[in-house]
């Protein structure tokens, strides 16, 4: 199967400044793939080269098998780009915005109307379609901005910091929307938020100073630098009994109670040799004893912690 995105030795220089070194990357069709790194790491430069906005200094890239330079028209047709800055027009309605962007992609007539209706449903804006965007909330504008890049149903959809500037509820809405788009397009999500890729993406690469320093699942990257898995457990049950039961699970090394003011649940941090297997065993243990499970979720490092540890890890040659 042709990769949705294939990059070989792709780099960009600005005089003596090497913004992106020489990236090698394959994004399989159907994945939600995270491009993670601190601001200034080279993420936007890499995206801009793939999208044809910047000319690479070296290397090649192809979108759905189309070379971005020798087959630029076909490559751009297979690509949807949703920039960090809103690209929609606030004095137009949601439907008028989508009509405009759909026309830019070469859509017209009944097909364009069909795609607009589909996009409005995906963005949950069908009932607001004829309202001016200037009256929309930040989250509504972000959802409209996102589906504007989907109208032509691209093979690869690139999202550049899609949750920037949103409140927590709006962030959750956008992340849920991205997950719901699985199967419609392969998605490359560029972000500096570690939790974002951990809850949305199948795999992630971490980039810094224009170089890829790690590639794996978010949980596996945590395991690489920590050596163990950390899991948050919240349960309604007697604390001492819950701790004893979880400590008895094979592979569990530590169970530490995490007291939070005003939280009536027993809140625990579990350290184990396995991740998903341990969480399944935790759920079975709690359910079998008749306790009420409130939450069981992996604990990931902050981007700063993970990044620093990975850099040290790579420098040691592991």
Image: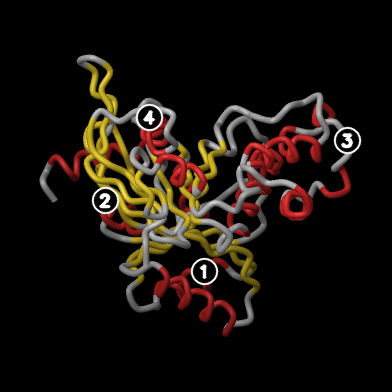
Pick out the residue farthest to the top: 15
Badge 3 crowding class, 10 Å Cα cut-off, few under 14, some 14 to 19, many 20 or more, is: some
Q: Do the residues labelled 4 and 3 touch (CB within 8 Å)?
A: no
* Element type at mark 3: loop
The quarter of the image holding the N terminus is bottom left
Q: Distance between the residues labelled 4 and 3?
A: 35 Å
Pick out the residue farthest to the left: 317
Residue 51, position as x, y percentages in the image:
44, 37
Q: How far apart are marks 1 and 3 (CA)?
A: 56 Å
Q: How is the image coloured?
A: secondary structure
Using the image, tell me which numbered label, if any, was put on residue 147: none
Does residue 113 appear left or right of residue 130 in this picture? left
Q: How far apart are marks 3 and 2 (CA)?
A: 49 Å
**Front: mark 1 or 2:** 2
Using the image, tell me which numbered label, if any, was put on residue 225: 2
Q: How far apart are marks 1 and 2 (CA)?
A: 31 Å
The residue pinned by badge 4 equals 45
* Element type at mark 2: helix
Of residue 17 and residue 312, the one placed in the foreground of this image is 17
Of residue 242 and residue 287, the one placed in the foreground of this image is 287
Using the image, tell me which numbered label, if any, was put on residue 240: 1
**Front: mark 4 or 1:** 4
Mark with earlier residue (2, 4): 4
């Amino acid at each position: 199967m042709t990769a949705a995105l294939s990059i070989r030795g792709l780099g960009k220089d600005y005089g003596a400044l090497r913004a992106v070194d020489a990236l090698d990357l394959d994004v399989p069709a159907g994945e939600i793939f995270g491009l993670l790194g601190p601001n200034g790491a080279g993420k936007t430069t890499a995206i801009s080269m793939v999208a044809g906005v910047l000319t690479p200094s070296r290397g090649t890239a192809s979108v759905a098998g189309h070379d971005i330079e020798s087959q630029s028209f076909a490559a751009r047709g297979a690509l949807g780009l949703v920039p960090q800055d809103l690209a929609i027009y606030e004095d137009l309605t949601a439907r008028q915005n989508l009509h405009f962007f759909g026309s830019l992609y070469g859509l017209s007539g009944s097909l364009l109307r069909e795609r607009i209706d589909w996009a409005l449903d995906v963005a949950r804006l069908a009932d607001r379609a004829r309202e001016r965007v200037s009256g929309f909330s930040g989250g509504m504008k972000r959802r409209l901005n996102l589906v504007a890049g989907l109208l032509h149903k691209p093979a690869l959809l690139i999202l550049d910091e899609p949750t920037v500037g949103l409140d927590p509820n709006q962030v959750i809405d956008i992340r849920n929307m991205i997950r719901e788009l699985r199967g419609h397009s392969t998605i490359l999500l560029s972000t500096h938020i570690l939790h974002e890729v951990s809850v949305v993406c199948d795999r992630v690469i971490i980039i810094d100073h224009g170089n890829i320093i790690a590639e794996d699942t978010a949980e596996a990257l945590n395991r690489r630098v920590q050596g163990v898995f950390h899991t948050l457990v919240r349960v309604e049950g007697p604390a001492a009994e819950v701790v004893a039961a979880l400590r008895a699970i094979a592979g569990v090394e530590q169970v530490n109670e995490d007291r939070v003011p005003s939280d009536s649940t027993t809140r625990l941090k579990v350290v184990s040799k396995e991740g998903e297997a341990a969480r399944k065993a935790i759920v079975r243990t709690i359910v079998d004893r008749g306790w009420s499970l409130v939450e069981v979720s992996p604990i990931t490092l902050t981007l700063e912690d993970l990044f620093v540890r990975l850099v040290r890890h790579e420098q040691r040659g592991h």
